[in-house]
Amino acid sequence: MTAPLRLAIAGLGTVGGGVLRLLQSRHSEFKERAGRDIVCVLASARDKRKKRNVDLAGIPWADDMETIIRSDAELVVELIGGEDGAARQLVEGALASGKHVVTANKALLAHRGAMLAALAEEKNVTLRFEAAAAGGIPIVGTLRESLIAYDINAVRGILNGTCNYILTQMEATGRPFAEILADAQKLGFAEADPTLDISGGDTAHKLALLASLAFGIKPDLANIPIQGISHIAPQDIAFAREFSRRIKLLGVARRVGDAIDQRVEPAMVRLGTPLADVDGAFNAVVAHAGQAGPFFFEGGGAGEAPTTSAVIADIIDIARGNVFPAFGRPAHALRAARPAPAELIKSPFYLRFDVLDVPGVVAEIASHLAQSAISIESMLQRGRAPGEPVSIVMLTHECSHAAVAGALQVIAASDRVLGPPCMIPMEAG
Amino acid sequence: MTAPLRLAIAGLGTVGGGVLRLLQSRHSEFKERAGRDIVCVLASARDKRKKRNVDLAGIPWADDMETIIRSDAELVVELIGGEDGAARQLVEGALASGKHVVTANKALLAHRGAMLAALAEEKNVTLRFEAAAAGGIPIVGTLRESLIAYDINAVRGILNGTCNYILTQMEATGRPFAEILADAQKLGFAEADPTLDISGGDTAHKLALLASLAFGIKPDLANIPIQGISHIAPQDIAFAREFSRRIKLLGVARRVGDAIDQRVEPAMVRLGTPLADVDGAFNAVVAHAGQAGPFFFEGGGAGEAPTTSAVIADIIDIARGNVFPAFGRPAHALRAARPAPAELIKSPFYLRFDVLDVPGVVAEIASHLAQSAISIESMLQRGRAPGEPVSIVMLTHECSHAAVAGALQVIAASDRVLGPPCMIPMEAG
């Protein structure tokens, strides 16, 4: 039998602790699958003395990243997080010194994935990140190794459990975003600082990785327009229901000619399609795999067990000796993505305007839309007391994102329009 | 760059032809992913002269399996099918002579998987079969390599597109099984001889493979009770709707204590759960992955593109040099499954009795059920003309499969009960 795989782990939070515990408790099971022992030869975390639910007896402690980088570990498991700092130092240093790396660090990879993939290849080691997108759903491996016979047309996903939980709760209770978020924080479903989640930033990190795997492009965070969910009002969710839709924060990447459109934004998905049924903190991905058709994957996207499951799978595959390029193709073959021009990004849109209930306001909005060649499919107006603000909802026929955004800018400048208009694309299908 | 991978392909039907065409048309794409050329050095099919939509020029032809087995191919792709005959000869011979094998042959593997896995290991080659279960859905790789951190509790799947198409059409039209089947055959959605599909046999082959991967047991077709869909009547489907359920042919494998229950049978799944929404010829699998929770996978389960997609993924992974045991663990570690005793297989049941509308018949049925300690949750009777047969539907509380089957045997013997009673488990969740 092959010699044991020597593993170092950095970061002993929920996931790191979970990984180490499983490596201990399921040692013989994993040994059978890997064909060799997996031994933890070095552990590290910010605070050595913190009480943890894991047995660290007998595992040497590393006080800094250099110690891990210079150690005789063959594989470094980085679960520190953050696009810079210790995590970056460790991953770069470990790869440069010829160590395999398993990481759940979507921020680091979304920013520096192509460079790190090239470094890994140069050193003939492997960089794995199944846990970095959609948690326990094996979508990284699926895009990298399974759905490769045909060109992928599009990948669409619910990639942030916190946002999906908040939207699900807003719908269930009719209560506004801020209240649901505050509750979610109290219950531990949202971080104390939820900015990265609710801004769509976390979804964008994950989308950049999935798009790279699906289309053979470099992760390209800079070219992903990002919209979060904090502007979604209970009435938008209620209106969506009237159109047999639900609002989901989606990361979408798709071919548009020979360019790739990538974007993170709330979208109205049709009831009865798989993404519409994804509730609570679950994640899900639809991959349109050319002639092989659409595939749908759903499961736990965060938290200890799903994330640990993904990290363990990467570790065991490395123990088996399976080394290949991080994004499924040689790093030099990854193209720089050409972003699709906004004029070519088309869909029907849901538009909501909060306006003063005075004569002529609908005509004013409609005429601005008409000037941008945006044609209206239907309109809804909810009456309030005369003189008070009312919400006007318009559904457009298919038109370009650029045209709508341009028209809304003009409309928002009207002193009869209160606050920025809300614009949500209606997903096809 | 590594030398080209020399591949031989046997069977040039829909899938074999599709694989060969893609290996030609996407040659450089696959070379980039595999890190080496993949060249077809030998092809074979029953009828050499048959017109095919694939370019065979320059590919040497093998007239028999021995020629392939004795060739210098490193990888044999078996797409002949059938549990015996040429397919078996080729797979056994190829492995024995140290060649990797990729196959979509669920029948062969369900019958002889453990032996073939052992043979592959002995020769240090790999035996791959992603296309043998659920077509394009990468469920074989997912169970073998991804969802391995925790013990899997259960795997449940819609694994036969023909059956799911027929049940979907029966529901949409209200027409009986035989008519829908005849139409499906005319439209090419069902085989000329559909026995293996509608009997549940094909589902059982696939289930045996998924259960082996999920639970580390030898594929164990002999211990899978199999029920098909030909006894399902339009009224069963209509009744299911009244209970917010749909009838699906499921393959189910689950832990029951330290035994494994495996069975293929129509089941009533609850509307709003993922399996209920799987329509037409799609396949889907739910894997209950211990603490990591349930995962759901849906996609094309048959036909050229989804099956070709799975075969290509296996070929490229072998070209990359990734060799490991067929069922994810060494063949010697696969346990013989201990079937779960029927007394321990519990669920609520839907029961339908077609009876003569005479006084006392309900009392007679109810008393037989009571004698087997089966308690009734609710009852429905649809009136017809007096003296004509009527359908009585009963939903039971949770009880054992064995108890219900026993009671139904007694009830069926009554001369007031017409035809065999229909018994369908109600899936939890």
Image (spheres, coloured by chain):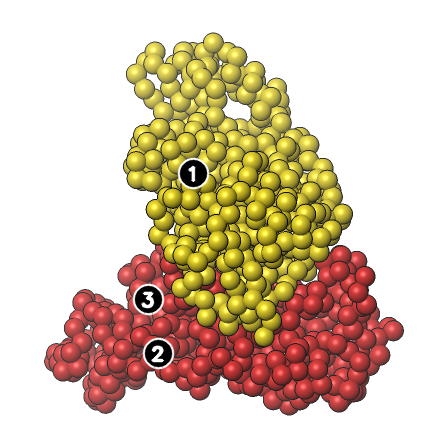
Chain colours: A red, B yellow
* Residue under label 1: B163
> Quick one: B165 or B349, which is closer to the camera?
B165
The spot of residue B175 in percent (x, y) is 31, 32
The nearer-to-camera label among 2 and 1 is 2
The nearer-to-camera label among 1 and 3 is 1
Number of residues whose C-alpha sits closer than 10 Å to that of mark 2, classed few (under 14), some (14–19) or many (20 or more):
few
Q: Which mark is residue A259?
A: 2
- Furthest-top residue in this view: B415
The answer to whether A357 appears left or right of A94 in the picture is left
Indicate which disc, 2 or 3, sits on the residue closer to the N terminus.
Answer: 2
Asked if the residue under mark 1 is in contact with the one under mark 2, i.e. CB atoms within 8 Å, the reply is: no
Q: Is residue A169 above or below residue A407?
A: above
The spot of residue B168 in percent (x, y) is 37, 41
Asked if the residue under mark 3 is in contact with the one under mark 2, i.e. CB atoms within 8 Å, the reply is: no
> Label 2 marks which chain's residue?
A
* Residue under label 3: A427
Residue at screen point 41% across, 31% down: B193
Residue at screen point 54% across, 57% down: B7
> Label 1 marks which chain's residue?
B
Task: Say if residue A199 shows up in the picture.
Answer: no
Describe the element under mark 3 as helix, strand or loop. loop
Real-space Cα separation, disc 2 to disc 1, in angstroms: 40 Å
Q: Quadrant of the N terminus of chain A?
A: bottom right
Describe the element under mark 2 as helix, strand or loop. strand
> Quick one: A99 or A416, which is closer to the camera?
A99
Q: Amino acid at mark 3?
A: Glu
Residue at screen point 67% across, 58% down: B324
Q: Would you identify the image quadrant in which residue A340 lies?
A: bottom left
The answer to whether A367 appears left or right of B230 in the picture is left
> Label 3 marks which chain's residue?
A
